[in-house]
């Protein structure tokens, strides 16, 4: 279980890095389109340069790939965070009897030491 929790933590970190890369590509694509295009049309919040320059196509490709990476990175990050929370909850339930037995052993040792000192 601990290995699965560590694997899920690693996957969660990778997913958030994917989200950050997607955000950078998205912003870069928008800036590329705004600087290169002569005339910009907007489809929702995505700029689309209507000029026949290769920079407009590059900007649109960066924007769409960045948006895709950001959405999938965020979704997989949330999925792996919930997955890791499940593993950690199960580990805490499985460690509960062990914690009780350890505390009982400590109490027994302490009581034995007290009785040995008093005699």
Image (cartoon, rainbow, N blue to C red):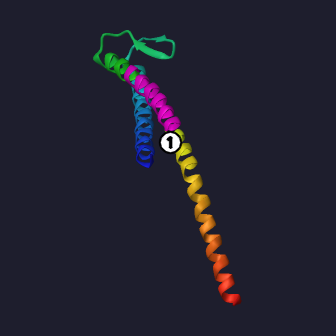
Q: Mark 1 highlights which residue?
A: 87
Q: Residue at x 43, y 26 (%)?
A: 72
Q: Is residue 78 left or right of residue 21?
A: right
Based on the picture, tell me whether residue 72 belongs to the magenta stretch.
yes
> Residue at (60%, 68%) from the top-left corner?
105
Residue drawn 45% across and 37% down? Answer: 16
Nearer the observer, 116 or 77: 116
The magenta-colored residue range is 64-83
Q: 19 and 5: which one is in front?
A: 5
Q: Nearer the viewer, residue 111 or 21?
A: 111
Q: Is residue 82 above or below residue 89?
A: above
Quarter of the image with the C terminus is bottom right
Residue 71 belongs to magenta span: yes
**Residue 67 drawn above or below residue 105:** above
Whole-percent x, y for residue 53 in the image:
30, 14
The image shows residue 2 at horizontal and vertical percentages of 44, 49
Residue 4's image quarter? top left
Q: Is residue 68 visible?
A: yes
Residue 63 rendering spot, x and y as whole percentages: 40, 22
Left or right: 9, with 117 as reference point = left
Residue extending furthest right? 118
Number of numbered markers:
1
User: Where does residue 93 sit, x and y in percent of width and height?
Assistant: 58, 47
**Is 108 or 8 nearer to us in this picture?**
108
On screen, 66 above or below 14?
Answer: above
Label 1: how many Cα within 10 Å (few below 14, some 14–19, many 20+): some
Can residue 31 be seen here? The reply is no
Most extreme residue toward the left is: 54
The structure residue drawn at horizontal position 38% and vertical position 16%, both measured from the top left corner, is: 37
Is 74 left, or right, of 100 in this rendering?
A: left
């Amino acid at each position: 279980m601990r290995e699965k929790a560590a694997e899920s933590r690693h996957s969660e970190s990778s997913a958030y890095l994917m989200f950050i890369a997607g955000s950078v590509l998205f912003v870069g694509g928008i800036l590329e389109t705004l600087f290169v295009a002569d005339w910009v049309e907007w489809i929702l919040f995505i700029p689309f340069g209507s000029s026949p320059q290769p920079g407009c196509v590059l900007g649109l490709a960066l924007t769409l790939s960045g948006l895709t990476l950001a959405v999938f990175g965020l979704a997989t990050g949330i999925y792996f965070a919930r997955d890791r929370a499940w593993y950690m909850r199960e580990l805490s339930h499985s460690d509960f009897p062990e914690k009780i037995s350890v505390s009982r052993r400590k109490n027994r040792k302490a009581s034995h030491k007290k009785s040995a000192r008093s005699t």
